[in-house]
Amino acid sequence: MSIDHYTYRVTWSQEDGEHVGLCTEFPSLSWLAPSPEEALSGIRQLVIDVVADMRASGEKIPEALAEKHYSGEFRVRIPPELHRALAMHAAEQGVSLNRLVSAKLAG
């Protein structure tokens, strides 16, 4: 697996007054830099170093989110009153409860 498959993000840190590079699969890592490009380059290099250390010590390396298989199903527990209200709303809209909740989550 390539570190290019990991999910990277660069954002501004008001607190630090610099851009911060992040990697979703390694939430404890970050890299501060004056420019977004340097923040991205820094976090990528840090991930390379950490993955190398993990390999050397036999640790399990996180799978890239982009490479994971998602079934499209998950369970959510909600109060019975909310379940009833959503079911009624779906019926009023003429759609399935699944379609109604999917649309609400997407929006």
Image (cartoon, rainbow, N blue to C red):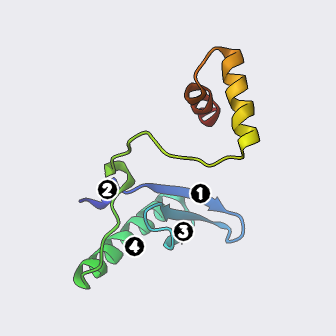
Residue 11: mark in rendering:
1
The image position of residue 102, as x and y in percent, is 57, 32
Which residue is under mark 2? Answer: 4
Residue at point 53% right, 46% down?
A: 75
Quarter holding residue 20: bottom right
Q: Position of residue 65 (x, y in %)?
A: 39, 53
Q: Secondary structure at mark 3?
A: strand
Q: Nearer the viewer, mark 3 or mark 4?
A: 4
- Across and down, in percent, residue 7 comes to 42, 55
Up/down of 96 relative to 35, above or below: above
| Disc 1 crowd, CA 10 A, few/some/many (<14, 14-19, 20+) | some
Above or below for 36 versus 71: below
List the residue tagged with mark 4: 46
Q: The residue under label 4 is which amino acid type?
A: Leu
Q: What's the residue type where badge 1 is placed? A: Thr
Mark 3 — residue? 33
Helix, strand or loop at disc 1?
strand
